[in-house]
Image (cartoon, rainbow, N blue to C red):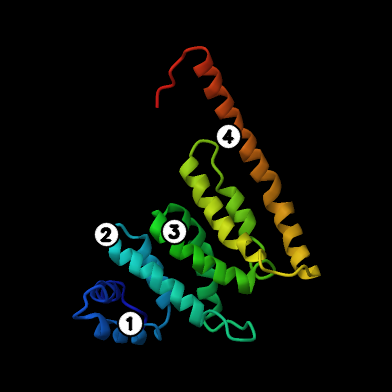
Amino acid sequence: MAADVGHIAQLLQATLDPAQHREAEAALKQEATKPQYSLTLLTIVSSDSFPVNARLSAALAFKNFIRLNYVDANGNYKIPQDEVQTIKERLIGLMIASPANIQSQLGEAVSIIADSDFWERWDTLTQDLVSRFSATDPKVNIGVLEVAHSIFVRWRPLMGTSGLYTEINHVINTFGTPFFQLLAVRTSLLDKSSLFHLHGFRIQS
């Protein structure tokens, strides 16, 4: 039986109550063994019908589930392939649209998945990111760049290898040009804003 959205949301809420925390955590561990538990958590995260603290708890639970259950020591998936694919299809857009506190939890999950799959098993990721750049909505762009940061920050402690350089070249080829185009657009808007101010105009927000 698949995990039940309403029941899991109630359990997540209960984990915030010290009197119910231990029992709720034990129940969630049982739910985590059911099919599509990870997708149920993402459904809760994405739904405005649940309280913000429940959505944040779902994001945290999703991150922890991915850390423990995404791949084994040999890099083999521990969850079904179709669930992996659906996670990848939903996660980026959800992270971009989420509040900052939820975004940070989902960003860590993206980084965990990227450690395993990027770029060869997730070669559409950077194209997905650049397709979401907006010439008019800075909030969307910030979300995209937060996702990108959660992926690229993994490089900092790594030693240079041919595999790493191949991954970096993939990012440069797929992400670099659209990113610089976005910077050019935003810089142009800033220049226009400065010009208006220099001539004594007040820009209406």
Question: What separation in Å lies between label 2 and label 3 (alpha carbons)?
Answer: 18 Å
The numbered mark, 3 or 1, whose residue comes first in the sequence reads 1
**Secondary structure beneath disc 1?**
helix
Please name the residue that numbered disc 1 is placed on. Answer: 28
Counting residues from the N terminus, which is met first, the one under dot 4 or under dot 1? 1
Q: In the picture shown, does residue 164 fall above or below 76?
A: above
Q: Position of residue 98 (x, y in %)?
A: 41, 55
**Of pointers 2 and 4, the one earlier in the residue sequence:** 2
Q: Where is residue 19 shown, x and y percent of the image? A: 18, 80
The first of marks 4 and 3 along the sequence is 3
Q: Amino acid at mark 3?
A: Gln
Q: Position of residue 59 (x, y in %)?
A: 40, 67
Viewer-side label of 1, 2: 1
Vertical placement of 86 versus 72: above or below?
above
Of labels 2 and 3, the one closer to you: 3
Q: Which residue is mark 2?
A: 49
Q: CA distance from mark 1 to mark 2?
A: 20 Å
Q: Left of 31 or right of it: where is 113?
A: right
Identify the disc placed on residue 186.
Answer: 4
Q: Amino acid at mark 4?
A: Arg
Q: Residues within 10 Å of mark 4 (few under 14, many from 20)?
A: some
Of residues 19 and 35, the one drawn nearer to the viewer in this rendering: 19
Residue hosting label 3: 103
Q: Nearer the viewer, residue 104 or 172?
A: 104
